[in-house]
Image (spheres, rainbow, N blue to C red):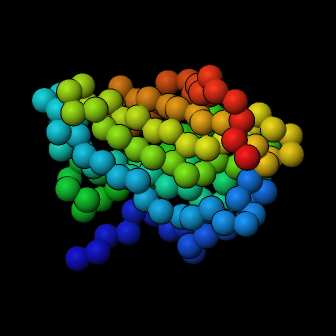
Amino acid sequence: MTQAIAPTQVAFDLAIPAMNVRRALVYPACGADISSGSSRGTLYCAWMDLTATNGTDIFLSRSADGGAHWSAPLRVNDDPAGVANDQFNQWLAVDPIDGSVNLSWNDTRLDPSHVSTHIFYARSTYGGQSFAPKHAGDHGAHE
């Protein structure tokens, strides 16, 4: 049986300033906690979606019952709400030793024209229920 995690505003892809030629795709990046920690067996899925006032954001949902039920989507990027920055091309990995949930994505928040991106990273050691402050990669912008 197919179980929906969350409805999306974007069906498949979206032209945003940083991806106006190739378009940004809506796709899940998922992982499972195989550590020996308290969240062992938890499933995680992250995706990009369009919001009414924020541009595109990265969201995460978790399931502790094998995918039968999913948590409400959690907005992972921490740029100010109401500012139309775009976050996209997310990737998720669950550390097999400590069970931390790690996400990276392209982010336009540092470019007022929203064309150049930096790689941002967030880590949760709380089973994907909250994330530590986000960090930009030390390398330059990507166009």
Q: Position of residue 61 (x, y in %)?
A: 41, 50
* 98 versus 93 height, above or below: above
* 8 versus 32 height, above or below: below
* 130 versus 2 height, above or below: above
The front one of 58 and 89 is 89
Q: Position of residue 120 (x, y in %)?
A: 58, 34
The front one of 20 and 37 is 20
Residue at 52 percent of width and 32 percent of height: 121
View extreme (right): residue? 113
Residue at 50 percent of width and 68 percent of height: 7
**Residue 89 makes an appearance in the image:** yes
**Residue 82 makes an appearance in the image:** no
Q: Which of the 4 image quadrants contains residue 16?
A: bottom right
View extreme (left): residue? 36
Residue at 23 percent of width and 40 percent of height: 33
The N terminus lies in which quarter of the figure? bottom left
Q: Position of residue 75 (x, y in %)?
A: 56, 44
Q: Position of residue 37 (x, y in %)?
A: 18, 28
Residue at 35 percent of width and 40 percent of height: 93
Q: Is residue 127 left or right of residue 14?
A: left
Q: Is residue 35 left or right of residue 110?
A: left
Q: Which of the 4 image quadrants contains residue 10?
A: bottom right
Q: Is residue 28 left or right of residue 113?
A: left
- Count of number-bearing discs: 0
